Image (cartoon, rainbow, N blue to C red):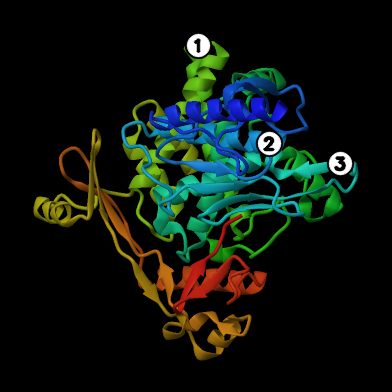
């Protein structure tokens, strides 16, 4: 009799599932059945991570978006439901920020799989097919730490996937600033996803007494995992016990080749997670200044924070689409953000980007030659006409071999896993773009010399060699496919 009722129930749920699949959404499908019972109920969702147990909320189990489908692998558990809700919330928020031009598909072109409990470790990664999360015991408390139970960690990996969907041309390119921007964008996505929950906004405002310049639940990223790694490393390397990273910092832009390849956490290095904190800190500064501006207009604190959140992220995603793939990408994306911004937001961002040395003041107008301007506009691969003018982008996919550009003695130093990276075809950041004012005058350009492009690519090869992150067997972050250096995953 029990089996009979279970069969009847499952048939009923299957019919419901079929109905929804014929509509504009899909429902989550676990591996052992067509539909999870969670899809019909509210879920006790962990908004941040176990370090803030008061930040829980009963949330309706969200449908899977039609344009960016995903599937959570594994049994029904807190980890799997947390993954589902975080990913669905992050996708929805990003698509709303891009409402005039939503993301159509993942970089892989198909549904991605989410693995909440892959294997032991304190890590997570995205590999174009999957979001993969690890778990391990906390070195001090001995409690199990699940990366999937941190919305920051889950949304960070989702951020990599969403940026990859918007700019798949970044995936294997050899340019330190683009590597770093990938990390910054992932962290910003984590903060933006968290800020979709009113409880998190209220918590941050109460925690700081409306002074978001102070460290808070929004600025701190991956608190539980960061604390576990802090105790695992015994605080070495300048780590702090509060979080894996904090968006509040004073780091300023510097050429990556002038920075050490690695450094303690309290110093800036060219390593992508470290270097990404420059743009991460700048974006958080913009968020805070937008909030303070909105608050000065007698707007309620939580309403002001929501407005600031949406404006800051909207300009970011628009800038990401418009900026060319160049070695100085931070500069390019910052200037694209300024081009699309209205006042007073453009002025606020300009101050922040200059203070961080991401952009420098323009010295003079580049050209008033209307004929030259028309030629650029006519030959552009992508042209975006804006209220303030226009951006013309010249697309280019170029590969080089470092062996053709660097001295022979230096080439031999790039051998990893018995493979000489200098002999592989590598993608380089060699696009260009041009900015025009309302009158059609050329006001700015973004392009790089071949010397600069090669220098940045060589620095990337050195970092791959130093970290031993290359393997011909595709088991590490970088591998080789048909003689070309390709990224396998990003953490």
Looking at the image, which is closer to me, 259 or 5? 5
Assign a secondary structure to mark 2.
loop
Quadrant where the N terminus sits is top right
Taking 292 as reference, is 104 above or below it?
A: below
Taking 121 as reference, is 451 above or below it?
A: below
- Front tag of 1 and 2: 2
Going 38% across and 57% down the picture, which residue do you hit?
A: 325
Looking at the image, which is closer to me, 393 or 7? 7
Crowding at dot 2, Cα within 10 Å, few <14 / some 14-19 / many 20+, comes out as few
Residue hosting label 1? 299
* Mark 1 or mark 2: whose residue is earlier in sequence: 2
* Residue 310, disc: none
Instruction: Give the Cα separation between the discs numbered 3 and 2.
Output: 21 Å
Taking 386 as reference, is 199 above or below it?
A: above
**Percent x, y for residue 249?**
64, 41
**Percent x, y for residue 45?**
67, 27
Residue hosting label 3? 143
* Mark 3 or mark 2: whose residue is earlier in sequence: 2
Assign a secondary structure to mark 1.
loop
- Asked which quadrant contains residue 170, the reply is bottom left
**Percent x, y for residue 431?**
32, 61
Residue hosting label 2? 76
Assign a secondary structure to mark 3.
loop
In the displayed structure image, the side of residue 446 where residue 42 appears, left or right = right
- Front tag of 1 and 3: 3
* Mark 1 or mark 3: whose residue is earlier in sequence: 3
* Direction left: furthest residue: 371
* Direction bottom: furthest residue: 408
Instruction: Give the Cα separation between the discs numbered 1 and 2.
Output: 42 Å
Crowding at dot 1, Cα within 10 Å, few <14 / some 14-19 / many 20+, comes out as some
Going 82% across and 43% down the picture, which residue do you hit?
A: 144
């Amino acid at each position: 009799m029990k089996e009979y009722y279970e069969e009847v129930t499952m048939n009923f749920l299957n019919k419901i599932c079929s109905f929804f699949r014929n509509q504009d959404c899909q429902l989550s499908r676990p591996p052992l059945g067509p539909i999870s019972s969670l899809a019909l109920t509210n879920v006790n969702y962990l908004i941040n991570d176990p370090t803030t147990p008061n930040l829980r909320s009963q949330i309706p189990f969200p449908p899977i978006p039609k344009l960016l489908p995903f599937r959570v692998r594994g049994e029904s558990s807190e980890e799997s439901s947390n993954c589902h809700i975080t990913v669905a919330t992050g996708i929805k928020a990003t698509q709303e920020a891009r409402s005039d031009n939503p993301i159509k598909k993942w970089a892989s072109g198909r549904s991605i799989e989410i693995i909440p409990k892959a294997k032991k470790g304190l890590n997570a990664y995205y590999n174009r097919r999957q979001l993969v999360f690890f778990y391990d015991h906390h070195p001090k408390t001995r409690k199990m730490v699940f990366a999937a139970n941190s919305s920051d960690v889950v949304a960070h990996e989702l951020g990599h996937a969403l940026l990859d969907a918007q700019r798949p041309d970044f995936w294997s390119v050899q340019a330190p600033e683009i590597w770093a921007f990938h990390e910054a964008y992932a962290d910003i996505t984590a903060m933006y996803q968290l800020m979709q929950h009113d409880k998190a906004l209220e918590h941050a405002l109460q925690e700081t007494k409306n002074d978001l310049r102070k460290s808070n639940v929004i600025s701190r990223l991956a608190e539980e995992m960061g604390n576990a790694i802090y105790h695992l490393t015994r605080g070495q390397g300048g780590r702090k016990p509060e979080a894996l990273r904090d968006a509040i910092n004073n780091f300023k832009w510097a050429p990556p080749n002038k920075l050490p390849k690695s450094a303690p956490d309290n110093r800036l290095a060219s390593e992508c997670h470290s270097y990404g904190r420059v743009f991460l800190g700048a974006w958080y500064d913009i968020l805070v200044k937008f909030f303070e501006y909105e608050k000065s207009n007698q707007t309620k604190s939580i309403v002001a924070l929501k407005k600031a959140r949406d404006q800051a992220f909207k300009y970011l995603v628009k800038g990401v689409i418009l900026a060319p793939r160049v070695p100085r990408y931070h500069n390019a994306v910052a200037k694209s953000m300024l081009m699309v911004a209205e006042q007073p937001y453009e002025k606020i961002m300009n101050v922040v980007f200059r203070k961080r040395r991401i952009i420098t003041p323009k010295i003079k107008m580049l050209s008033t030659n209307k004929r030259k301007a028309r030629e650029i506009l006519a030959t552009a691969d992508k042209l975006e006409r804006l209220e303030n003018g226009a951006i013309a982008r010249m697309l280019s996919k170029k590969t080089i071999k470092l062996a053709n550009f660097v001295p022979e003695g230096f080439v031999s130093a790039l051998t990893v896993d018995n493979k000489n990276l200098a002999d592989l075809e590598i993608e380089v950041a060699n696009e260009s773009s041009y900015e025009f004012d309302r009158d059609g005058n050329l006001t700015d350009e973004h392009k790089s010399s071949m010397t600069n492009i090669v220098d940045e690519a060589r620095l990337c090869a050195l970092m791959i060699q130093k970290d031993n992150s290359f393997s011909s067997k595709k088991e590490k972050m970088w591998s080789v496919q048909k003689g070309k250096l390709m990224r396998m995953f990003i953490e």
